[in-house]
């Protein structure tokens, strides 16, 4: 950072004011470009800095608590020991940035790009007086679908962070603290998790192919449906983790019903029988890539269950509980989700649109049924924009 530009306090305040005016009205003000600028120790608390350019900037020790940096470009920036607690960082670009000792506690980092970031640096790289080697803190951060490919997050604190669907391929997480973290459907191919603490984490559906988990702690970890092909598990007590859903007397009957239901769907009702699972407990069940179209599943507990790629067209799911369930790529066209709990569910790429209604013999009845989302709890659910013409809902503004 030898070629950094220096900026006066007055000029900086003016640039931020013009940027804020530009955000409010593109015909006023102008976007700020603070790339390659020395902003060491600057105070940006609660500042509106969306889409700002900070490429290669020196933000060591800067206070960005509560700031809105959504869509900002911090490629190659140095954020050593910066404070980003509770900051809004949706789709922020941190590619190749230095984030060692940064406090991201409670930050909203959904869709952020942290590829090739460095969570640790050599002491000589720190321009402050002292290097207290404070760990990178991402505890409670929302990192849904964040790109963290090949980042160096050795020793980082990610306790209770939500990394659902995140790309962590080739990422170094050696000795990282991931207690209670959510890694549902995360891509961890070739990741280094040696000596990492995954106690009570949720890694359902995660891809750990070729990852190194040597001496990792997995006590109480939920790894149902996780892919562990060619994974290094030396020194890992896998017996203390959950790899398969618990078997119970319902499993045999469930298996029979699913086979009969598949026949019923594929033959237009001529063979088999419609599945009726009303009131069942299917917590953490692996129901991926199944055809459950038209099934009767009212009041079912599907907490933590996996439906990735499944067909639930016109299924009756009224009052069912899908908290923390994964419905990535699931087809919910015409399904009834009235009164369902979808809190923290992953509905990424789910198909939610009207479905044509058929007669009992498979013929089109000439009518369509919209997906019913009335009285549905979608708190913190991962769900893309919905077309109000395709769903039944209490308030269209909820999905704007």
Image (cartoon, helix red, strand yellow):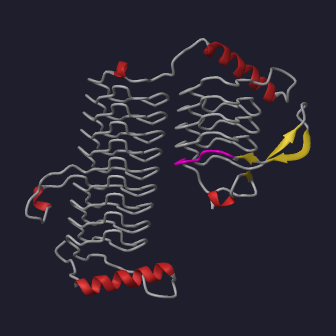
Residue 394 highlighted magenta (yes or no): no
Q: Is residue 202 left or right of residue 176?
A: right
Main secondary structure found in the magenta portion: loop
Q: Nearer the viewer, residue 47 or 356?
A: 47
Q: Which residue is pictured at 60% across the width and 32% down the height?
A: 288
Residue 395 or 329: which is nearer the viewer? 395
- Quadrant where the C terminus sits is bottom right
* Spot occupied by residue 322 in the image (x, y as percentages of width and height): 59, 36
Point out the image quarter for the N terminus.
Answer: bottom left
> x%, y% of residue 295?
74, 30
Q: Nearer the viewer, residue 229 or 80?
A: 80
Report the residue that reaches farthest toward the left.
129
Q: Is residue 209 above or below residue 140?
A: above
Q: Which residues are magenta?
A: 375-381
Rendered view: 275 above or below 187: above
Q: Is residue 330 left or right of residue 37?
A: right
Picture mark count: 0
Q: Is residue 105 left or right of residue 123?
A: right
Say which quarter of the image contains residue 174.
top left
Residue 74 coordinates in the image, percent (x, y): 34, 67
Q: Residue at x 43, y 23 (%)?
A: 242
Give the residue displayed 27% in from the left and 41% down from the top: 176
Give the image quarter of residue 230.
top left
Q: Position of residue 83 (x, y in %)?
A: 26, 61
Q: Nearer the viewer, residue 242 or 226?
A: 242
Q: Is residue 301 above or below residue 395?
A: above
Q: Is residue 178 left or right of residue 243?
A: left
């Amino acid at each position: 950072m030898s070629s950094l530009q220096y900026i006066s306090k007055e000029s900086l305040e003016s640039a931020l004011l013009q940027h804020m005016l530009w955000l409010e009205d593109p015909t006023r003000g102008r976007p700020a470009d603070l790339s390659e600028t020395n902003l060491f120790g600057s105070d940006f608390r609660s500042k509106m800095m969306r889409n700002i350019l900070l490429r290669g900037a020196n933000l060591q020790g800067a206070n960005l608590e509560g700031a809105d940096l959504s869509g900002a470009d911090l490629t190659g920036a140095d954020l050593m020991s910066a404070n980003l607690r509770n900051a809004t960082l949706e789709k922020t670009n941190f590619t190749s940035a230095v984030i060692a000792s940064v406090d991201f506690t409670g930050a909203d980092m959904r869709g952020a790009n942290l590829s090739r970031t460095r969570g640790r640096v050599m002491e000589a790289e720190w321009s402050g007086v002292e290097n207290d080697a404070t760990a990178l803190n991402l505890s409670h951060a929302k990192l849904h679908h964040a790109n963290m490919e090949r980042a160096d997050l050795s020793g980082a604190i990610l306790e209770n962070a939500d990394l659902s669907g995140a790309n962590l391929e080739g990422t170094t997480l050696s000795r990282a603290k991931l207690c209670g973290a959510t890694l549902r459907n995360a891509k961890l191919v070739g990741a280094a998790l040696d000596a990492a603490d995954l106690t009570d984490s949720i890694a359902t559906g995660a891809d750990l192919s070729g990852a190194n988990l040597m001496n990792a702690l997995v006590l109480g970890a939920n790894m149902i449906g996780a892919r562990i092909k060619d994974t290094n598990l030396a020194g890992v007590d896998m017996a203390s983790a959950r790899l398969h859903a618990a078997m119970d007397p319902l499993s045999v009957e469930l298996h029979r019903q699913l086979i009969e239901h598949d026949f019923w769907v594929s033959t237009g009702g001529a063979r088999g029988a419609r599945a009726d699972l009303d009131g069942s407990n299917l917590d953490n069940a692996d129901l991926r890539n199944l055809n459950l179209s038209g099934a009767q599943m009212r009041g079912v507990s599907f907490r933590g269950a996996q439906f990735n790629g499944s067909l639930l067209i016109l299924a009756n799911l009224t009052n069912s509980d899908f908290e923390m369930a994964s419905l990535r790529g699931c087809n919910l066209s015409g399904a009834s989700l009235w009164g369902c709990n979808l809190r923290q569910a992953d509905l990424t790429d789910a198909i939610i649109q009207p479905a044509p209604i058929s007669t009992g013999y498979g013929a089109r009845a000439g009518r369509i049924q919209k997906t019913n989302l009335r009285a549905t709890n979608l708190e913190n659910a991962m769900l893309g924009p919905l077309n109000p013409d395709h769903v039944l809902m209490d308030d269209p503004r909820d999905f704007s």
